[in-house]
């Protein structure tokens, strides 16, 4: 099934996020300080340049569509995962392998959750809203 046009750009960004998550996990597992430092810098740059805007767009534009619906717990989970990723940024600034590994794990799970659960719920809401207009 093709994504709603409103969600297609976010889905494309998810591909890059999965690649970033893999980089995090591989660098953390390697225990190579240079690889960990490089990956931490890369994640921080990606967060600043891409992920933060992605998260804010979801939080401000899409998640409110699920407010007061049976799918509201999906929005709450999304917000919690965004918070968890943001909380790991300080550890990344300190080149923490544990923070890097956790960031990768959470990011990968988060992207899969959004693609498999959140986005289908949003598409239902968007279709419902378009039918009412």
Image: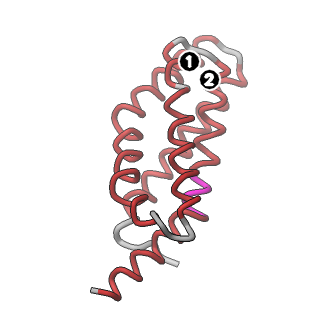
Image point 38% across, 47% down: which residue? Answer: 54
Image point 58% across, 59% down: which residue? Answer: 73
Percent position (x, y) of residue 23?
59, 33
Query: Is 126 in the magenta?
Result: no
Image point 51% across, 70% down: which residue? Answer: 69
Q: Which mark is residue 31?
A: none
Label 1: which residue? Answer: 91
Percent position (x, y) of residue 36?
59, 18
C-alpha separation, residue under disc 2 versus residue under disc 1: 5 Å
SS category of the residue bearing label 1:
helix
Residue extending farthest to the front is 68
Judged left or right of residue 122, residue 6 is: left
Please, is residue 112 above or below residue 125 in the view? above
Viewer-proximal residue, 122 or 24?
A: 122
Question: Which one is earlier in the sequence, the residue at label 2 or at label 1?
Answer: 1
Please, is residue 3 above or below residue 110 in the view? below
Magenta-highlighted residues = 111-116
Quarter of the image for the C terminus: give it. Answer: bottom left
Total marks in image: 2
Percent position (x, y) of residue 84?
57, 35
Image point 56% across, 43% down: which residue? Answer: 80
Q: Callout 1 environment at 10 Å: few (<14), some (14 to 19), or many (20+)?
A: some
SS category of the residue bearing label 2:
helix
Circles 2, 1 touching at the beta carbon (< 8 Å): yes
Percent position (x, y) of residue 100?
61, 25
Label 2: which residue? Answer: 99
Q: Main secondary structure of the magenta part?
A: helix
């Amino acid at each position: 099934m093709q994504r709603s046009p409103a969600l297609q750009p976010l889905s494309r960004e998810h591909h890059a996020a999965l690649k970033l998550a893999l980089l995090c996990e591989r660098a953390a597992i390697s225990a190579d300080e240079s690889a960990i430092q490089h990956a931490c810098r890369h994640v921080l740059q990606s967060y600043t340049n891409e992920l933060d805007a992605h998260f804010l767009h979801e939080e401000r534009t899409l998640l409110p569509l699920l407010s007061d619906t049976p799918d509201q717990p999906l929005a709450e989970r999304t917000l919690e995962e965004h918070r968890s990723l943001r909380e790991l940024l300080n550890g990344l600034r300190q080149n923490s392998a544990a923070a890097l590994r956790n960031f990768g794990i959470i990011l990968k799970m988060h992207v899969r959750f959004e693609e498999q659960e959140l986005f289908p719920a949003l598409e239902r809401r968007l279709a419902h809203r378009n039918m009412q207009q």
